[in-house]
Image: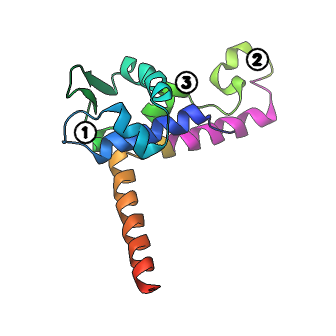
Amino acid sequence: MKMSTRGRYAVRAMLDLAMNWGQGPINLKEMSRRQDISVKYLEQIFIPLKAAALIRSTRGPSGGYTLARAPEEMTLGEIITAIEGPVAIVDCVQQPEKYPRSPTCVTFDVWKQLSEAISAILDRTTLSILVARHHAKAGARSATLKSSK
């Protein structure tokens, strides 16, 4: 299984909003510069995120986007599902009724377990966890740079 660029960029954009939580709406031009993602692509990514009520938009000169809920209340599972659809590594896991072999297929159980494991990790990973990991890695990187001088 390989996640699309669209899914990865959606997580980066949502992480950017989480890192700026509480600072008001974030302008897409600023986010585009920080994340190295074109404004047009961000606009396309934000359509399904807004439809899923994961983000809010504000119009006007100081407008932009904010998370619809606090970073600790938003999971990667919600974000990925809004962009990619339900997590299933093969189609038969998502719709077993369409595949007559599903009840007797030996590999079906493996694919289902794998899809459930991926979903479980995404569903328990919140944006606030990623923000904390970002700060920890940035701190470690800073310490490494200081010690190498």
CA distance separating discs 2 and 3? 19 Å
The answer to whether mark 2 and mark 1 are in CB contact below 8 A is no
* Rendered position, 146 above or below 79: below
In space, the residues marked 3 and 1 are separated at their CA atoms by 22 Å
Q: Residue at x 69, y 14 (%)?
A: 97
Question: Observer-nearest residue: 12 or 148?
Answer: 148
Q: Quadrant of residue 115?
A: top right
Q: Residue at x 48, y 22 (%)?
A: 44
Q: Quadrant of residue 16?
A: top left
In magenta segment, residue 104: yes
Rendering coords of residue 32 (x, y %): 42, 37
User: Viewer-nearest of labels 2 and 1?
Assistant: 1
The residue where tag 2 is placed is 99
Q: Earlier in the sequence, mark 3 or mark 1?
A: 1
Q: Amino acid at mark 2?
A: Tyr
Q: In the rendered structure, which disc, 2 or 1, sits on the residue that comes first in sequence? A: 1
Q: Which residue is mark 1?
A: 70
Q: Secondary structure at mark 1?
A: loop
Q: Which residues are magenta?
A: 102-120
Of pointers 2 and 3, the one earlier in the residue sequence: 3
Q: Is residue 75 visible?
A: no
Q: Give percent across and percent down for residue 55.
A: 32, 27
Q: Describe the element under mark 3 as helix, strand or loop.
A: loop
Where is the C terminus found, in terms of image quarters?
A: bottom left
Question: How packed is label 3: few (under 14 Cα within 10 Å), some, or many (20 or more)?
Answer: few
64 displayed left or right of 97: left
Residue type at mark 3? Gly
Does the magenta stretch mainly form a helix, a strand or a loop? helix
Mark carried by residue 85: 3
**Quarter of the image that includes the N terminus:** top right
